[in-house]
Image: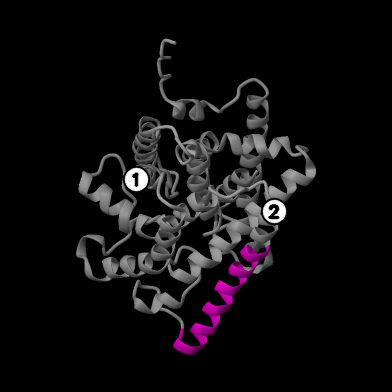
Amino acid sequence: MARAVAIIGMIAVNVGPRGAEGFLGALYDLPLGRASLLFMLLAGVGISLMTRSVRGTGGTPVPWRMVLWRAVLLLLGGLALQIPDHEASVILPLYGLLFIACLPLLRAPTWVLGALTGTFVLVGPLAWVAARTTWAPVSRRTEPTLLDPPGEILSGILFTGAYPAVVWAAPFLAGMLLGRLDLRSAVLQRRLVLWGAVCAAGGHLLSQVLILVFGTPERTVGWDRLVSATAHSHMPLWLIASSGAALFVLGLCLLAGRLASGSLPVLAATGRLSLTIYVGHLLALAAFVRPGPGSLATGIFTTVVLCIGSILFAWLWTRRFSAGPLEMLLRGPRQPRRAS
């Protein structure tokens, strides 16, 4: 369910237009900088749930072949998906890189994950600003594609793209940490809602106070941006506020799933096909929507059509199959069974 909320939000952001005036424009822009971070947080949760058997007493071996298979598909497929003219930034290459990087952490103590998460929240934005202001090759934002040289691809994923890994590793690690907890606990679910709301509001409030004291940051990347909590500023207060919003949504979805007792199958089905829907909506944008939409009304209409189509497809598909087309591909080749 939470994954479906993230996908719907990302569709709205990628369709656009963004920055429209008025209450409706602000509401339409609400997923900006939040939906993608929720998607990243859930990726970390998913990798922890998928590999939980390796952490128990006498745990199974780390499924590094499966993780690498998924990482390579997401990395190469995401770089290829950046080529069509959909005018969106593809998050999948970052997934691939982080899946590879997380392999040594699958059995790491929980306190190590917590320490790394806090470190990336604080140090990641500093490293990003330092790279963007002092290192000439990453002085401008670029989205790497499969056609670029390996060095440009790596620097794009690490620093210059819309989702710099040096910053976005923080919500992924937070998700890995969260995936080790008992998400079925009602107490934990309520705490996610409460503290998620506190972080979401507190991050923005503290940013506004700091801006009053130190002034509004310039549009160009500089150290004055550290007080910002605006969407995709890649700063600590934005990470805290948007991560809080992600925890709030996840807590609500967990509570709704427990209290509603499975009465939201359509939304859950959409989340199960999140990769297929994500790739499909970008190809649809490139084929049928761009250039455009030219107005907020057209953008909302296009978003509604894409979301309804995606939800309907997911509901029909999951009535017959257990996983989506691309999700089946992520499972990889079946391992031969050992003779008993």
Q: Mark 2 points at which residue?
A: 252
Vertically, is 135 above or below 10?
below
Q: What element carries label 2?
A: helix
**Image position, residue 281 (x, y; %):** 53, 39
- Residue 160, given in percent of the width and then of the height, sits at 32, 58
Measured along the vertical axis of the image, is residue 216 above or below residue 105?
A: below
In the rendered structure, which amino acid carries the disc numbered 1?
Pro
Q: Which numbered disc flags the more N-terminal residue, 1 or 2?
A: 1
Q: Which colour scheme is used?
A: one colour
Type of residue at label 2? Leu
Answer with the quarter of the image where residue 137 lies.
bottom left
Taken as a whole, is the magenta stretch helix, strand or loop?
Answer: helix
Q: Is mark 1 on a helix, strand or loop?
A: helix
Which residue carries the number 1 mark? 104
Tell me if residue 211 is in the magenta stretch: yes
**Segment colored magenta:** 194-215
